[in-house]
Structure formats: structure tokens, C-alpha cells
Image (cartoon, rainbow, N blue to C red):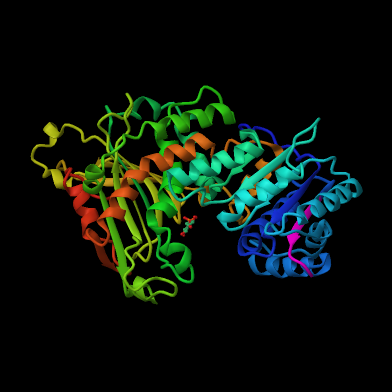
Amino acid sequence: MANGSFEQKTPDACAFVIFGVTGDLTHRLVMPSLYNLAAGHLLPDKFCIVGIARKGMTSEKLRDNLLEGLHKYATRPVEDEIAKRLLECVTAIEADPREPDSFDHLKTQLEKLEAARQTVGNRLFYLATPPNAFAPIAQQLGRVGLLKEDGEAWRRLVVEKPFGTDLASAKALNDDLLKIVTEHQIYRIDHYLGKETVQNIMVLRFANGMFEPIWNRHHIDHVQITVEEKLGVGHRGSFYDATGALRDMVPNHLFQLLSLVAMEPPARFDAHTVRNEKAEVLAAIQPQSEAEALSNSVRGQYTAGEVGDAEIPNYRGTEDVGADSTTETYAALKLTIDNWRWAGVPFYLRTGKALGVKRTEVAIKFRQAPFAMFSCTPVESLAENYLVIGIEPTQGIMLQFNTKVPGPMIRTDGVQMKFNYKDYFQAEPATGYETLIYDCMIGDNILFQRADSVEAGWRAVQPFLDAWKKAGAKGLEPYAAGSEGPKAATDLMARDGHSWRKLT
Ligand code: BG6
């Protein structure tokens, strides 16, 4: 996005150092994104990729391993010429965070390589590792001086999700990292911000004059944020059972959507201003007591069922999941935002696995018109006014309103005006990480989470985590895989006279 990336620039010469270089994330997302950037001539000429590897991994073996991954996960046909150019940049260096001395060796090797490749000391350390390795790696890099910014050269640390598992651990991780680097050096990734449809929310709101005057409690009845997935937990049982739907999705992905929809207009399109506004709105989410949290939330866990043609086993029968697990695979919350724009407007959030449909969207429901003119028309036959921001798989924007059915009588019907990305733009298939990786290299952190936002997100969900932990199995509602989720989620809305937007 490049500070409102109104123009494209080539990143500075740099070393791109990957921890977790043979892992899933590197294969699936990082390398295919680097390939796409190389294909678009968006990598610097003076560039090297350093894979931090365990003993015995040579550069040659690593290149083979990465090429194999690229063939499997690239989003477009792999051209030999581009792959060769990219892989020529790869060097393996041995280091292991469990052996601190190995970082002294890493420093010597890296500096030699940097001199040979003329990358002038700019370094990006990408931690594609399990989260418990973030702080130990950063500490070792800090100890040997690899993260210290001196002179012109920049040093950056890219951290993947999850960032903490609750408010206390997120704060502790921020404290640990901020002892080693300053905030501007940290790039906390949330892959939702790599999605075009998510980045477009700000453009929709602030590059068009007609939405802002009605974007408030006077005109908006409530907001629904939905992330429904068809897939079950699959082989991620061990991670997921310790995490659950709320931690996995809400303080990060759903709150990114919420903050973009609810933030005040930033005065400037730069990282500082935009991130201030996003942090402000998250901090304005009204804190809930544990009793309120229980009454304003729903937890569900899937049981065996069919999603399309796929049989999904009972969550509790999944590999690495306890037979009496009380981890939620579905969460719905009602939140309010305590500021002038949103006072009294509920925000309903829901997310779940093994559901009948895949859908990620934000639905803005406008207040109903006074229907006096149409008093003979039953209210339920009047369409609700929705503006729907489709994130995935429908990528676009839809406005729903009433119109007159042609004919001599006055009859109304709901219609939809739709914008679909694919009708207007032809983008090369991408991983969604290209913009994020490019932005790390050009030093634009507009699309990355700042410490205060991360903590504000955890602060808002902490009452739910605490209340659910105490409640244990009580209140955990089973739902069949392939269904719409727990009935209690419908009741959560019905209580306020609302209903979740149905797919039409
Ligand atoms: C990840 C979660 O962060 O996001 C997964 O850990 C989830 O459980 C995924 O499936 C959803 O991402 P997307 O882009 O498919 O909506």
C-alpha cells in the first residue's frame, strides 16, 4: 500500500532472512509471494534470501526444497527463468534458537553474504515459526546486534499470527520485543490486511462522498461481521484445541474488519494516522462484565456431519483433540462501540468452522424507512436495506433496496445492485501476501498491527475468554457440521429483533 502507495517503488537492496524456511507457511505463502513479486519486477536487484536452517541443510538442498514447494503452491505457472533468478538469491545458514551460540555464527555468515551481495546492511527477519519462538529468536538477534539500526541501514522484524493468546501474553510479547527493537521496526502480520477486498473498505468509505454522511448511528441500525468456513479443523487439532474460534479469528481478523468499518476518517493516508484511528476504535469497544459477556455471546462445537460431499467427523473425535474438549469451533458476539458515531449500534460478529457455506462479509444494515406510505404492504415483504462488503468468496459490494414491481398496482420488491471485482479488474491470481511482503520491504507499516491495537483487541475479548473458561461445558452448544451453526446464534440476534443476513 506504500503510505497510500500512490506510486510504485522498488524496494531497497536488502537481505530477507527467513526463520522456519522449510515450514508450511514459507512454502505456501512466502515463496509464492516472492515469486510473484519477482515476476512483477518488484524485488530489488541487490537481494538475498537467507534460510535459517538446522544442521546439514546446504544451500543447494534448500533451493531444491523451495523449488519443490513453489511448484506445488505457486499461484501461476512457474517460469524457469524467474524461479532460477529467485532461487539464485537463496543461501542456507545454520542457526538454532535453542543454541544461542549459533547466532554468533549467523552474524558472521550473514555479514559476509551481505558484503558479497551488496545489500548494504538492510535486513528483514521474517519469523515464520511457531509463536513460542518469536521472543527467543528476537532476543538472540538482538544480543548479537543484528537488529540494531545504525546509520542508514534498516532492520525489520516480521512476526506472524498468533500474537499472544490473551491480553497478558500479548502484552508480555510486546514488552519483550520492544526491549529489542522499536515499534517502527516491527511488522505484525494479519493476513486479512493483505486481501484486496479488505484494503478496499477504506477506499469505499473515504474516497466516496455518499457513504460518510450516513455512516453513523442515525442511519445504521446494526453491523454484522461474518466469517463462516466450510473446513473443519483437519490436522490442526493440537493448535486449534488450545486456541478455539474466538482466539483464532476474533481479536485479529474480525477486528481488522470491524476497525476498518468503524474507524473515524483519518486525516492523512499514512501508517501513523490510519493506525491511530484503528487503535482508537478498538479501544472504544465497550468492556463487558463476565455476566454481560456470557449473555452477549454464543459458543458452539461441531458434531459429525456433511459439508457438501465431505464427511466431517465429530470435533471431539479429531486427531489431537480431547474427547471431552470444551473448545469452541463457533463463536458469536454482540459488541458495542462507545463513541459518538456508534453509540447504541450493535456490532454482531460470528465465525465458525465446518459450516454449510463459506462466506466472509460485512453487512451494514440501515434503519428502516418509515413505511407509512406503504401501510398496505406487509412489513416483512419489504426488503431490508443492506450494504454488503463481500470479502470472500464473493468479492464485491452489494446494495439492497426496494423497488416498484412493474405493473398497474403499487407493489414493492427487494433488488440488489452488485459490483463484482472480476467484472472490472483482471488481477493475476495471488497469495494475498505479496502486498504485505512488499510493504515490509519498502518500510510501510500501514497494513500491520501496532502494539496498542493488538492489546486493545485482546482487551475487548478477554471478558469472553474468562467467562467461557469458568463456564466450561455449560453453554457450549453442539451444531452439526454442514449446518448454519448453533441455534443460540440466531437467538442472540432475535432477542434484539434482528436476524443474520441470509444468503440469497
Ligand atoms: C487463520 C486461522 O488465521 O485464518 C484459520 O488460523 C482460518 O483457522 C484462516 O481458517 C481463515 O483465513 P481466510 O483467509 O481463509 O478467511
369 or 105: which is nearer to us? 105
Q: Which residue is found at the position 60% from the left and 37% from the top?
A: 178
In the rendered image, the vertical position of residue 217 relative to residue 252, given as above or below: above
Q: With 364 as the anchor, is 128 left or right in this view?
A: right
Name the chief secondary structure element in magenta. Answer: strand
Q: With 375 as the anchor, is 267 left or right in this view?
A: right
Q: Which residue is found at the position 29% from the left and 36% from the top?
A: 336
Inspect this view and state whether residue 332 appears.
yes
Q: Is residue 126 magenta?
A: no
Inspect this view and state whether residue 406 appears.
no
Q: With 414 as the anchor, is 315 left or right in this view?
A: right
453 or 361: which is nearer to us? 453
Task: List the single residue furthest toward the left.
Answer: 376
Q: Does the magenta stretch include residue 54?
A: yes
Task: List the single residue furthest toward the right.
Answer: 116
Question: Splitting the image into 4 quarters, where does residue 228 fall?
Answer: bottom left
